[in-house]
Amino acid sequence: MTNVNIKESFCYNPVMKPRNAKPYHHGNLKTAAVGTALEMVENEGLEAITLRALSHKIGASRTAIYRHFDNKEALIQAVILAGFERFDAEFIDIFADHERSVLERFSMMGRAYLAFAVENPKLYRVMFGEKARLEREAVCDLEDPENTTGFHALVGLIEAGQQQGVFKKSDPFLAAASVWSMIHGLSMLIIDGHLVVSDKVDAIFEAGIATLLEGLKVTLQAKDVC
Amino acid sequence: MTNVNIKESFCYNPVMKPRNAKPYHHGNLKTAAVGTALEMVENEGLEAITLRALSHKIGASRTAIYRHFDNKEALIQAVILAGFERFDAEFIDIFADHERSVLERFSMMGRAYLAFAVENPKLYRVMFGEKARLEREAVCDLEDPENTTGFHALVGLIEAGQQQGVFKKSDPFLAAASVWSMIHGLSMLIIDGHLVVSDKVDAIFEAGIATLLEGLKVTLQAKDVC
DNA sequence: CGATTATGTTGACAATGCTAACACATTGAT
DNA sequence: ATCAATGTGTTAGCATTGTCAACATAATCG
């Protein structure tokens, strides 16, 4: 019997068990549950996650998950946190790339953000849905030294732009909120199908970023000149 | 027995029935179902709507709704459409108020939009959720003469601004998409608790509108002058 | 009046989240 | 080493929910 059963391939436990012996304990059920649930969210949507379906996929019984999470909602919260880890990782390099100008980093950030949403629409929707509020309230608490979210970095980028004279002086928190709003709103409208754009995604993105930059950059009103 | 039963108060049927006689037919079950469901969405959230709870509220049996809607999903779609009727009504007067300048109408529109979302968060979330896609795909089909949506009017407002020389020339569809994105994004971030703002809603709104207007208005870059 | 259609009701079923009771495994103090 | 306590996994079963089938009542129309 060289058969490898399914459960074994999900078993992340470094302690090896005798081959083909199905161990009573899964070994890493919690990690497997979150990881598999994350995949299910992205592939089939949040509603596809039933505890029975998920348990089956990871090779456990219906209620094993209750040993690691209080209820389904807690499991979803863990999936959301895992989603944000992926998400935040997309921006670390961009914000830290001091070789590039503020404007370059700005539009790269926007492009990466929209790309994540468009490529992972079902996950993005859950991450920024109503339920995601609970565990992530520190996003806009800029005083919190633990705050390493993309929003925090965006505020920093705008501050840098202001200090370099690229952006006009204004409350960088408010400016960042405006920027985030537009990019988040654009992402949501597109992935939820309200803005039916098909092939015009790029044009809409460019127009949005251009409007934002025009609004943020140092400018002189026409009336000030004429 | 001068008791008035609950069902009667929901009976919109103009044909009067003998008092205290509970009629076999509801009389206006479909309208009552949508109206009550709309209230339930706003008061308790979408998840509070179970066909049993809803049927009970309108004084009908569990499955009566299936005589008027194929399934629960179809009922929700009707609720969403009813929500958009309320929503769109908020903007008709604003867009049509030609006494006011384009800029005034612009910011009034934005303020009314955000106010609707903040005052009806649960309804707004459902209206602009994933499920609302189906029945409302014509929103950004500007060729459609039936299109009387707010988005259509927004495009018109931006065109007017461009013709008056208030806004710089650009594709008005793209400009409107940018504007809608920011206001929708701001609404969603606030009502879903991602941007925790509490008392700063006004400041954030003003900053966002200002950024948009700065980005849309006729401007001269500083570099063009210096 | 009678038949057809529209509308409303009851009973039942499968799927789902969850709890209770039990089974197995691991750990750690003695 | 022992064994009690704890951690982890399983099965049985319950309440809720969406849905369907079968039946009941009302409205419509020839």
Image (cartoon, coloured by chain):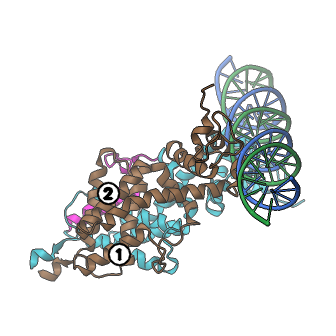
Chain colours: A cyan, B brown, C blue, D green
Q: From the viewer's perspective, is residue B158 above or below residue A138?
A: below
For mark 2, give the secondary structure. helix
Residue furthest right in the image: A1
Which quarter of the rendering shows the C terminus of chain A? bottom left
Residue at point 37%, 47% (across, down): B196
Q: Which amino acid type corresponds to the residue marked 2 in the rendered image? A: Arg
Residue ID for mark 2: B111
- Position of B124 compared to B200: left or right? right
Q: Quadrant of residue A223?
A: bottom left
Q: Position of residue B3 (x, y in %)?
A: 60, 27
Which quarter of the rendering shows the N terminus of chain A? bottom right
Q: Is residue A153 magenta?
A: yes
Please name whichever residue, D10 or B191, is drawn nearer the observer in this view of the structure: B191
Please name whichever residue, D19 or B22, is drawn nearer the observer in this view of the structure: B22
For mark 1, give the secondary structure. helix
Q: Is residue A128 magenta?
A: no
Residue ID for mark 1: B156
Going from N to C along the chain, the mark reached first, 1 or 2, is 2
**Range shown magenta:** A136-164
Disc number placed over residue A211 in the picture, else none = none
